[in-house]
Image (cartoon, rainbow, N blue to C red):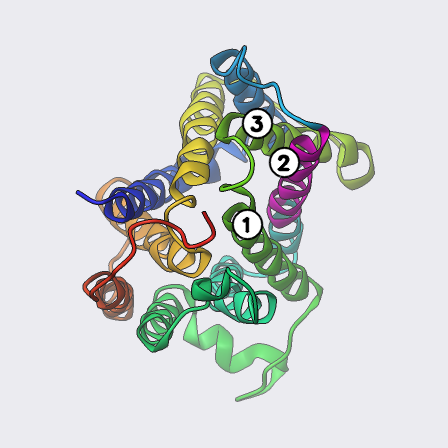
Amino acid sequence: MSLRWRADLALALIGLIWGSTFVLVKAALADCSVFLFLGIRFSIAAVALGLAFRGRLRGSGREYFAGFLTGLSLSAGYILQTVGLKSTTASKSGFLTGLYIVLVPLLAACVYRTGPDRPTVPGWREWLGIAMATSGMTLMTVDWDTIRNWGGGAGGFALNQGDLLTLAGAGAFAVHLLMLGHYTGRVSVPVLSFTQIATSAVVPLGLLPLLETPAVRWTSSLVAVLAITGLLATAVVFVLQTWAQRHTPPSRTALILALEPVFAMICGFAVAGERLTVPAALGAALILGGILRVEMKPSSASTHPSI
């Protein structure tokens, strides 16, 4: 199996892990305030990576600065999305966050207009797959009654402060994917993985006094969720993503990670007993179709062109 296929399968596994932990995180937030939860989750991951990579974290100041910048974009995405969720609906938040699928290739087209990284700009097959995945995300996440009432009137459309913050969060996630795609061929995986996670732990903890009154109720379920999300869904996943993006362009990464809501829907249906609607099923099929449309194309390169 080629490196490209292994990297793409790794990204699909990441989508599975993130999608399957959505129900767990939603339940855990009833016992812990959001920023405290994020700080603890990323702190657990940072400690785990520090222990796992001990002896392999020697890097230049430039490498650590790259990890710091990447961590800032990752932390910004989580913070903006979480704060925005306080004043918008979950369905709108899911849809607006999912727009990073489109933002990644658009930003890539601006950043990689010239130079050796030009091949990372998606071609027409990728754009078709992105369009299918975005349409599928819309069908899966949008509450059409809510959409009709945005702006207070029939057919009205308006974005409130929470919507704008969520959209900014999607932009931050898109920047994070592009930054990983840029740095993974230039910075060691241990240094980049550890530094971005450590930064993502420090930022929410540092902003905690300004953004919320910390509250926590230590229950066995909260401890379990923190362990699962901190170790598996953060430490393991972001090392895997950092490695995978050495061999997969950012636009393809964003497209494959669109599998996250598909797996979240499946887990919600199987575990939480949520209702499976026809639009959601059609949306999942469109996302899968978009990914397959890109994956089945012939490819002459097995690695990320920036390497």
Residue under the point 45% across and 62% down: 120
Q: Residue at x 24, y 48 (%)?
A: 5
> Mark 1 or mark 3, which has the lower sequence index?
1
Query: Farthest residue toward the right?
Result: 210
- The residue closer to the viewer here, 1 or 286, is 1
Question: Which element type, helix, strand or loop, lies under badge 1?
Answer: helix
Helix, strand or loop status at disc 3: helix
Instruction: Pick whichever, 151 or 267, lies toward us.
Output: 267
Q: Which mark is residue 67?
A: 2
Q: What is the secondary structure assignment of the residue under circle 2?
A: helix
Q: Which residue lies at the image location 45% right of the left edge and 47% below the top edge? A: 307
Give, as a three-letter code, the residue at label 2. Answer: Gly
Magenta span covers which residues? 61-78
Where does the image place residue 248, in percent across and percent down from the top left? 38, 51
Q: What separation in Å lies between label 3 and label 2 (alpha carbons)?
A: 7 Å
Nearest the eye: 108 or 266: 108
Distance from disc 1 to disc 2, alpha carbons, whole Å, reads 11 Å
Of badges 1 and 2, the one in the foreground is: 1
Give the residue type at disc 1: His
Q: Kindly check if marks 3 and 2 are in contact, taking CB atoms under 8 A apart as contact.
A: yes
* In this picture, residue 99 sits left or right of residue 39: left
The vertical placement of 7 against 204, above or below, is: below
Q: Quadrant of residue 201?
A: top right
Q: Residue at horizontal 66%, vertical 51%?
A: 80
Residue 256 lies, in percent from the top left, at 34, 55
Q: Is residue 265 above or below residue 163?
A: above
Q: Which sits earlier in the primary sequence, circle 1 or circle 2?
A: 2
Return the residue at label 3: 191
Q: Is residue 79 visible?
A: yes
Q: Earlier in the sequence, mark 3 or mark 2?
A: 2
Which disc, if any, is residue 182? 1
